[in-house]
Image (cartoon, helix red, strand yellow):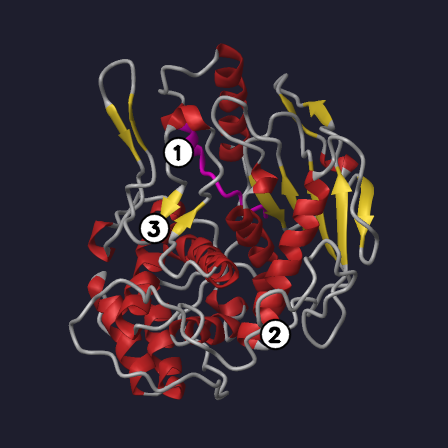
Amino acid sequence: MSFPLISSHDMRLWLQWPALRDEDREQLKAHIAALEALELEPEEESEELVTPIEQRFAIGDIIAESGLYTPPMTKDSPRKRERSEGEELSPSKRPNMRGGATSLNRAIYDHGNATIVDSNGKTIPDGTALPGVLRRKESEPPVSIVGHEIANTLYDNIDIIAKFFHEAFSYDIMTGFSKIPASYKYGKDVINAYWLGDKDQAVFGDGSSTIYNCVTGDLSLVCHEICHGIIRHRCDFTMSNSGESGGLWEAFADVLAIMIIQRHTKRKDFWLICEHLFAPPTKARGFRDLQAPGTAFNYVNDKGETITDASLDHYSKIGSKSEKYPISTVVSHAFYQSVCASKRPSWETVGPVWWESITTLNNSNKKMKIQEFATLTARMSAHGGAGARMAIQLGWKKIGINV
């Protein structure tokens, strides 16, 4: 199963953009057809919520005031073992950072825009050409070939992810991996990124000059896709690709991506997924806004109609036909509300509760409902003290779920 960042529904919205070039419109239609043709993995029924691992994690007992929702802190709060400014080398110059107990092992490939023509006459990425030409492996110097500098960006971004998991959660992202492979220049003009379950790797397209920038250059997008792989290896399963469980699966990747970005950039009030994905003419802020779902992009088409972000912000708004991406922001918005209630950085109080909850899941949870996951986080929050428990409860309550 593949996990694209952008849904066919969202792509259809962009077909209505009046400034879209004819060639880009045709390319967009081809991608929509490809996404809609994705086959879902067989799903197994499950009514049992897995018992959480009784494992404590070190987070402060921060007391949150009942009913008070304020923006996250704007001033940095010192943490244990915080590195001082300039203490370490940049990721590109650091040959082999330890993501945990095992040395990080990255492998960055160039897919070379390889394509084939399918039975319907459509040009699609050539999956048989994956992973592609190896451009940079662990401990090698940066790629200097003109036009392939993006390989270094991808290499560095995986380092940032490994550093976050090691320092924030004491977790080694190499768990279950012999190496972490990622391919750029996937297909031709592909305006998406995926974690390909069958290939066990991430792939990133080049984007479209009029709508999307090169997708590999956006840290949140890289984090989102790599985190799909990390969760898959940690839990040895994937959730259903639709409905509430599909929404949970996408929200997990978004929430982890946001924590990574906030800690790396020290922007604790940053909640946008794909801030750098859209090309300037679109005037879009990003692809999903966890703080204010439904406001990431907004424009008026040639018919005078306003096309808006379809993300949802409340459990009551989920319908029987709701797609997983709009559903995902209901879940991630609950995370945002919990972080606000905790008055702590996202990775300190609420983040560990969510991560520990995610890591207890297994194949019996393939069709988990949002209420079930909310209940699980409430149970896990007991290990984090009164502050964590209060923040988790208030966050879910804000989007219409009581735990």
Q: Residues within 10 Å of mark 2 (few under 14, many from 20)?
A: some
| Magenta region | 1-12
Query: Mark 2 vs mark 3: which is more N-terminal?
Result: 2
Residue type pointed to by label 2: Tyr
In the rendering, at what x and y percent does residue 134 appear? Answer: 82, 44
Q: Is residue 31 magenta?
A: no
> Where does residue 116 sit, x and y in percent of width and height?
72, 24
Please state the horizontal and vertical placement of residue 145, each as a whole percent of the image.
80, 35
Q: Along the line of sight, which residue is nearer the eye, 186 or 170?
A: 170
Circle 1 packing at 10 Å, graded few (<14), some (14-19), many (20+), is: some
Q: Which mark is residue 327?
A: 3
Three-letter residue code for mark 3: Ile
Residue at the spot of label 2: 171
- Check disc 2 and report its element: helix, strand or loop: loop
Q: Residue at x 22, y 50 (%)?
A: 317
Task: Judge whether residue 235 can be spotted in this image.
Answer: no
Of the pair 305 and 348, the residue shown nearer to us: 348
Question: Are the residues at dot 2 and dot 3 in contact (C-beta closer than 8 Å)?
Answer: no
Mark pair 2, 3: CA separation: 28 Å
